Every structure is written in C-alpha cells, then in structure tokens.
Image: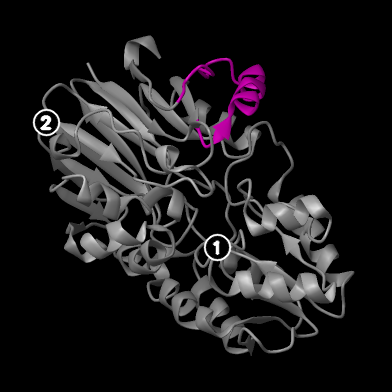
Amino acid sequence: MQTIHLQGGFGEKGRTSIAVDDGATLLMLDAGIKVGAPAQDYHPRLARAAAEIDALFLTHAHEDHIGALSWLLRQGFNGPVFMTAATRGEMAATLAQYARPDDLAACPGSAAQIEIFSAGDRLTVGAQTIDTGHSGHVAGGTWFAVTSGGQTTLYCGDVVPHSAVFPMTPLPACDLLVLDCSYGPDTVPAADRAKTVIEWTAAHPCGSVLPTPLSGRSLELLTILPGPLAMSDDMEAPLRAQLADPDLLHPGMAARLRDRIAGLHRWTPGDPLPAMPLLVHDGMGETGPARAALDQAERAGHPVLLTGHLPEGSPGWRMHRAGTADWHRLPTHPTLPENRALWEATGRPAVIGHSCDDAALDAVQQSLPALNAGTRTGGSLKIGDA
C-alpha cells in the first residue's frame, strides 16, 4: 500500500512537496521553498533522510516547486532528478534567486544527476511507474501519476485546465488525487478575470507596472493585453526560450507570441517608467527588476497591478496592504469548478489539496466533500485512509 508523506504545501502556500512510499522505493515529487518563511519552514519537511530518497521528480521551475533543490542535494540526496528540458532551462535562474546562497554555492543545480523526460513519457523507478502529462501551467510543466502495488497517486503540482497558451493533458483515473487548491473556493472564470485586468490597464493610460513570474503568467499577460506594452530587457531571452518548442503551447501560439515579443518596448531598471503597461519579473517584487520597478513606482505614485500570490512580507504584499498597489487575479491555477471537474474525470477518488490555508481547504470541502481538509505539512497518510 502506498504511503503519502506531506512534506510541504499542506495547510500553507509554498515549499510544495510530497513523497510516495511503497515500502521499497521512496519518490519525492517537487522540492519547493516558502517565500518569506523563517528558516525552519523555508524548505520541505522531509519524512526520511535525504539520502533515503530514491529519485526526485520536478513539475516545473517555479520557486515553490524547485527552489529547495540545492538544499536537498546538500542534505545528502544523490539520486536522479527527473525534469523536462524546459524546467532544466529555467532551473539556474530560479535557484539563483531563491536558494540559500550557501546551499547554492555548495550544490548548484548542475551538480544533480539530471534525467530529462518529455510530458507523455512513462518512467520507472524501482517498482513504481510514473506517467506524465502537460500541466497547462507553464511551458514544460507536468503532472505525475505514480502507480505501485495496484494503487495510483496523481499529483497535479500546478495545473491550468483551460489556459489560453499551454495545453493540459487529460488526467488518468487514480486512487488518490492531489489537487492544486491555490485558489481555494474561487469560482470566477478566467475570462472574467482577464477582462478585469484588461479594463484596469485601460483605466491607467499613462502607464503601469505589472510584476509577473518569468514563466507562465508572463505569456498569459502578453496574450490578453492589447496595445503597446513594455518589458524589462532581461525578460526577452527567457520568454523566447519558452517558445522554442511549439509542442509545449497551443497550436499557433508560439508564432503569435514571438511576434508580440518582437514589438515590445524594452525597459532597464533606472530608466523612467514608460507610459504603457510594463511587465517586470518576479510577481511578488521579491527579486529581479520587479523590486527596482516597484520602488520607483511607489516613489512616483505610479500605478501598480499585482495579479498573483503575495506572500506575507513580500514587497507586493506590503504595497497592496498600504494601498499603493492594486490586485486583480489573473488565473494560472484551477478554480473550484475546474477542480471539481478534474475530480469527476479521474473517477471521483479520494482527494487532498495543496497550496492553500486551512480556511480555504474547509471552504473547498463544502463543494467537494471527498476532500480531506485535515491534511497538514508533516503528516502522512495511506491511500485507504485518505
């Protein structure tokens, strides 16, 4: 019987990680960090010693899923690390921003035994079989379905069932579904959210700053926002890299976005803020050009729109709390109706949810009674007990 260890992201947002243990093989899925957390809560809470983990599988290169890789290596993990080529391409930049400097210096991501796979591949470690598929969240992002002993745990990581940019492979049937509950009970469709973001930028014709992660939401914003746009000059190469494999996007989307990027104005930190929407990374204002742009915007009273998760204590969180930045969600995770549809499509299995707090889990359970709302980081469960 599979035992699932909840190593991060349960009852909280950040340091997302689970481990699937069949008694002979221990697989770790994702190794994230929690932005703004104290040292004891920054990394996953490992169920067993790092050296006992047989393999690590990474869904994508956002910090709350990959940021603890150097730390894990330094803790003694020496097994293979499975990731897509797109995740491998973004790994170094994410670790440079979010790994602890001493961990990164001792164990850069390049020190890992990296195994590249493509979404749709079937992989095997020990007696465990791992099926994979596109997640719809970022280019090269994946979900994992781990089967052993006649049981299947399906770990969504971060998924977007109806992204305008990225495809999501239908999920297979499973015994335990680990859902991305980042948005809790939110039921507002993505189209309505996008309309709100478009209207907000139109209402600020003299320019605005939109912090955004390099992967995923940046391309979503380029797809929906009309008219002239600007971006920090260091975003061009990473964005073009995400378009290198057209099979990781919806048909025709790579060419459309390449044209869009070619027409963007370029901005360098220290330059005057442009009289048009400006995309800068990262989405929280914690690192990168976003930090400089938010400081500049706040001093000048320049409009700022935040569109994603804001960890407590981050610059974006502080500005929104102070009333110097607005916030309107641009969905890059599933809404409650989408999560319910995923549950139906996978055969109505037992469900646990990651990436949201206790209150949100309780609210989701009202519409999805199969959800076990009592799961917390540091706990473990057997599929039959979920």
**Residue placed most toward the observer, 150 or 376:** 376
Image location (x, y in percent) of residue 365 = 61, 19
In the rendered structure, the answer to whether residue 303 lies left or right of residue 272 reads right
Colour setting: one colour
Mark 1 Cα shell of 10 Å, populated few (<14), some (14-19), many (≥20): many
Image quarter in which the N terminus is found: top left
- The answer to whether residue 249 is left or right of residue 305 is left
Rendering coords of residue 344 (x, y %): 52, 26
The answer for how far apart the CA atoms under marks 1 and 2 are is: 35 Å
Q: Quadrant of the C terminus?
A: top left
Asked if residue 291 shows in the view, the reply is yes
Q: Which residue is mark 1?
A: 165
- At a point 18% along the width and 43% down the height, the residue shown is 55
Element under disc 1: loop
Could you tell me if the residues under marks 1 and 2 are in contact, i.e. CB atoms within 8 Å? no
Foreground of the two, 237 or 378:
378
Q: Is residue 22 magenta?
A: no
| Left or right of 295 on screen, residue 254 | left
Which span is picked out in magenta? 354-376
151 or 31, nearer to the observer:
31
Q: Which mark is residue 127?
A: 2
Residue located 32% across and 54% down the image:
119
The residue type indicated by label 2 comes to Ala
Compared with 161, 179 (above or below) is above
Q: Badge 2 local density, few (<14 within 10 Å), some, or many (20+)?
A: few
Which residue is depicted at the point 81% across and 57% down? Answer: 196
Q: Give the left or right position of residue 117, taking residue 235 as reference.
A: left
